[in-house]
Amino acid sequence: MPPTFGWDNLEDIAIALTDKFPDTDPLTVRFTDMHKWITELPGFSGDSAASNESKLEAIQMAWHEEFQERQG
């Protein structure tokens, strides 16, 4: 993972969220909570106002994919 990352680093965000919340199914997380969690990730340098529903949906899908892979 790069030392800092922003909204367009979907895979890095997905990995970090899965590491931090390994038992959380991403499809059950509200966008408002996910937005907060992302902005609190170590190394996240994106502007909190620069997100939008489309970016959050893409992040949620990347996170879901990472979550599924780890569930085996």
Image: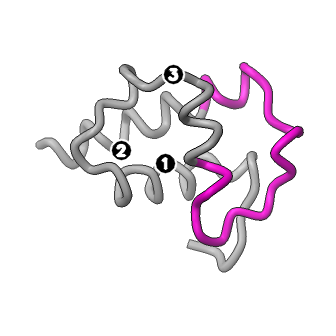
The residue under the point 56% across, 58% down is: 12
Q: Which residue is mark 3?
A: 30
Location of residue 61 with respect to 4 vertically, above or below: above
Camera-near label (3 vs 2) is 3
The residue under the point 24% across, 44% down is: 69
Q: Earlier in the sequence, mark 2 or mark 1?
A: 1
Q: Which residue is mark 1?
A: 14
The residue under the point 75% across, 56% down is: 6
How many residues crowd mark 2 within 10 Å: few (<14), some (14–19), many (20+)?
many
Proximity of marks 3 and 2: CB atoms separated by less than 8 Å: no
Looking at the image, residue 59 sits to the left or right of residue 49; the answer is left
Q: Of the residues shown, which amino acid type is indicated by label 3?
A: Arg
Location of residue 48 with respect to 12 vertically, above or below: above
Proximity of marks 2 and 1: CB atoms separated by less than 8 Å: yes
The picture places residue 29, in percent across and down from the top left corner, at 43, 26
Q: Secondary structure at mark 3?
A: loop
Coloring scheme of the render? Answer: one colour
Stretch of the chain drawn in magenta? 38-58
Q: Which residue is mark 2?
A: 66
Q: Of the residues shown, which amino acid type is indicated by label 1?
A: Ala
Location of residue 29 with respect to 18 vertically, above or below: above
Compute the Cα span from label 3 to label 1.
15 Å
Q: Does the magenta portion include 43? A: yes
The residue under the point 33% across, 49% down is: 21
How many residues crowd mark 3 within 10 Å: few (<14), some (14–19), many (20+)?
few
Proximity of marks 3 and 1: CB atoms separated by less than 8 Å: no
Q: Which is nearer the eye, 37 or 18?
A: 37
